[in-house]
Amino acid sequence: MNTILIYKSYHKMNTKRIARAMAEVLEAKLAKIEQISPTDLEEYDLIGFGSGIYGGNYHKDLMNFIDNLPPMNKDAFIFSTSGELNDKYNNLIKVKLGGKGFKIVGEFASLGEVSPLKFNLNLKGPLGWLGGKNKGHPDGRDLENAREFARSLLINDLN
Ligand SMILES: Cc1cc2nc3c(=O)[nH]c(=O)nc-3n(C[C@H](O)[C@H](O)[C@H](O)COP(=O)(O)O)c2cc1C
C-alpha cells in the first residue's frame, strides 16, 4: 500500500508530530501541503489529509487543495489536532473528499496545545483559548494513539 500523508501545521506544529508518528508506522511519505501538487498523488493508493483546526475547520490551504483535485478513486483518511474535540470539525472535509470520489477509511483526532500568547497557563474553559490550554498535547499517549490508528489502517488493508 503506497501511502502519503499531506498536512498543514503551523501554530505549535502539533499536527506535524501526529503526522510523523503515523507516517513511521505506515512507512509513508510525509509532505507539507505547500510541497505537493495534485499530480503527485497519482502513485499513491492511500492518502492521509491532516491539519490543525482553525476557526472550526481544517486549514484553508488543505481545503483548497482538495477543491482543486480531479476526481479520485482512492482511499483516504483524515486527522487533526484541536483545542477541543468535536466531530463536527470533520463534516466539511468529508463532504469535499467524498465529492472527489475518495472512500474515507479512517478518522483520527487529538487534542493539541493552544497558546496564542507567549505563555500557556493551561486553563480550562473559555479563558484557555487566550491564556493557553492542553499544555503538552499531543503527549506520549496521544502519539501512541496515532500509531495505533495507523496500525489499524494496515490491518484493514490486509482484510
Ligand atoms: C487561529 C487559531 C484558531 C483556532 N481555532 C480552533 C477551533 O475553532 N477549534 C478548536 O478546537 N481549536 C482551535 N484552535 C486550536 C488548534 O486547533 C490547536 O492548537 C492545533 O493543535 C494547532 O495545530 P498545529 O500546531 O498543527 O497548527 C485554533 C488555533 C488557532 C491558532
Image (tube, rainbow, N blue to C red):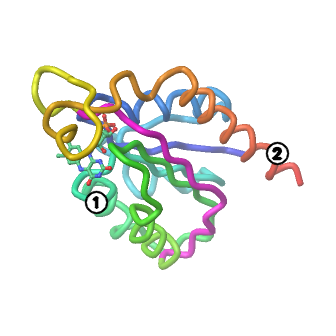
Judging depth in this view, the residue of 159 and 68 nearest the camera is 159
Compared with residue 92, is residue 45 higher up or lower down, i.e. above or below? above
Residue 56 horizontal/vertical position (percent): 28, 60
Residue at the image position 55 percent from the left and 56 percent from the top: 42
Please state which amino acid type lies under the numbered disc 2: Ile
Residue at the image position 49 percent from the left and 35 percent from the top: 19
Residue 143 horizontal/vertical position (percent): 55, 27
Judging depth in this view, the residue of 15 and 122 nearest the camera is 122
Residue at the image position 61 percent from the left and 64 percent from the top: 104
Compared with residue 144, is residue 107 higher up or lower down, i.e. above or below? below
Residue 1 horizontal/vertical position (percent): 73, 46
Quarter of image, ligand 1: top left
Please state which amino acid type lies under the numbered disc 1: Gly
Q: Quadrant of residue 58?
A: bottom left
Identify the secondary structure beneath mark 1.
loop
Which region of the structure is painted magenta? 100-114
Give the number of the disc on residue 23.
none
Name the residue tied to disc 2: 155
43 magenta-colored: no
Name the residue tied to disc 1: 56
Q: Quadrant of residue 107?
A: bottom right
Judging depth in this view, the residue of 75 and 139 nearest the camera is 139
* Mark 2 or 1, nearer chain start: 1
Compared with residue 93, is residue 121 higher up or lower down, i.e. above or below? above
Asked if disc 1 is less than 8 Å from ligand 1, the answer is yes
Compared with residue 82, is residue 116 higher up or lower down, i.e. above or below? above
Asked if disc 2 is less than 8 Å from ligand 1, the answer is no
